[in-house]
Image (cartoon, rainbow, N blue to C red):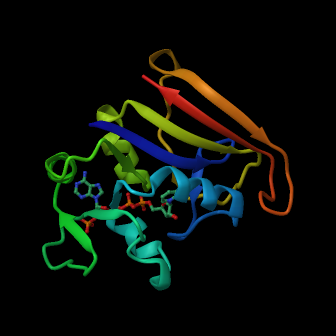
Amino acid sequence: MIISIIVAADLHNGIGLDNGLLWQIPADMLYFKTITSGHHVLMGKNTYLSIPDKYRPLSERTNIVISKDSSFENEGAKVFSTIEEGINFAKANEETELMIIGGGKIYEAAMHFVKRIYLTRVNHTFPLADTFFPFMEKHKWHLKTSRLQLKNESTNYDLMFEVWEK
Ligand SMILES: NC(=O)c1ccc[n+]([C@@H]2O[C@H](COP(=O)([O-])OP(=O)(O)OC[C@H]3O[C@@H](n4cnc5c(N)ncnc54)[C@H](OP(=O)(O)O)[C@@H]3O)[C@@H](O)[C@H]2O)c1
């Protein structure tokens, strides 16, 4: 099983504000759905709670939530107290590519397990961002593919869809 991250980040690696996203980007939502559908998705409790009720749990995906809070239970999501337990659950279910979908704390803690990163670079800086994607040590990663999508009504910004591999 390969472990991957999927993330959208601004030019300073900003990914969130007030437990929400910094932007509305329909083209990236669609990309996220396409890449993650059919897979196990692993996320921190904050990210899970940030998903609007009507989209939670994320459909067509097995939702894994990481939390040390033993009272946190949620129908539709498997809750584990460590990332390793979440990974083992996906492995035991014969997942081929586990998707780590955020947020900042989980990206940081899971980075060393990860072999692939689907990074949507949003060509803008949001000065108010309060959550960030960790610094990628560029010598450890190579860019497999990149695709530019210029600003239009479904992107709102110029976007670069990049896939990095270790
Ligand atoms: N742009 C993007 O692609 C993207 C993607 C996802 C999320 N986001 C944004 O990121 C922000 C949320 O990120 P965040 O850093 O605040 O929270 P998070 O990583 O989603 O969740 C943090 C919580 O998860 C649990 N947790 C995290 N690491 C753990 C570990 N190693 N072991 C056990 N439990 C762990 C803890 O829950 P307990 O306190 O219950 O133990 C912790 O408080 C939001 O603004 C969201 O919109 C952006």
Q: Nearer the viewer, residue 111 or 59?
A: 59
Report the residue that reaches farthest toward the top.
139
Image point 18% across, 71% down: which residue? 69
Image point 44% across, 52% down: which residue? 104
Could you say where residue 137 lies in the image, as x and y percent from the top left?
Answer: 48, 23
103 w.r.t. 54: above or below: above
Number of numbered discs overlaid on the protein picture: 0
Report the residue that reaches farthest toward the bottom.
54
Any part of residue 25 in sight:
no
Answer with the quarter of the image where residue 43 lies. bottom left
Q: Nearer the viewer, residue 143 or 39?
A: 39
Could you say where residue 22 lies in the image, as x and y percent from the top left?
Answer: 65, 63
Q: Nearer the viewer, residue 59 or 80?
A: 59
Q: Quadrant of ligand 1?
A: bottom left
Image point 65% across, 56% down: which residue? 28
166 w.r.t. 133: above or below: above
150 w.r.t. 81: above or below: above
Residue 66 relative to residue 162: left or right: left
Quarter occupied by the N terminus: top left
Could you say where residue 132 lies in the image, as x and y percent from the top left?
Answer: 52, 49
Image point 48% across, 84% down: which residue? 54
Answer with the quarter of the image where residue 77 lies. bottom left
Could you say where residue 129 lies in the image, as x and y percent from the top left?
Answer: 61, 58
Q: Nearer the viewer, residue 13 or 35?
A: 35
Quarter occupied by the C terminus: top left
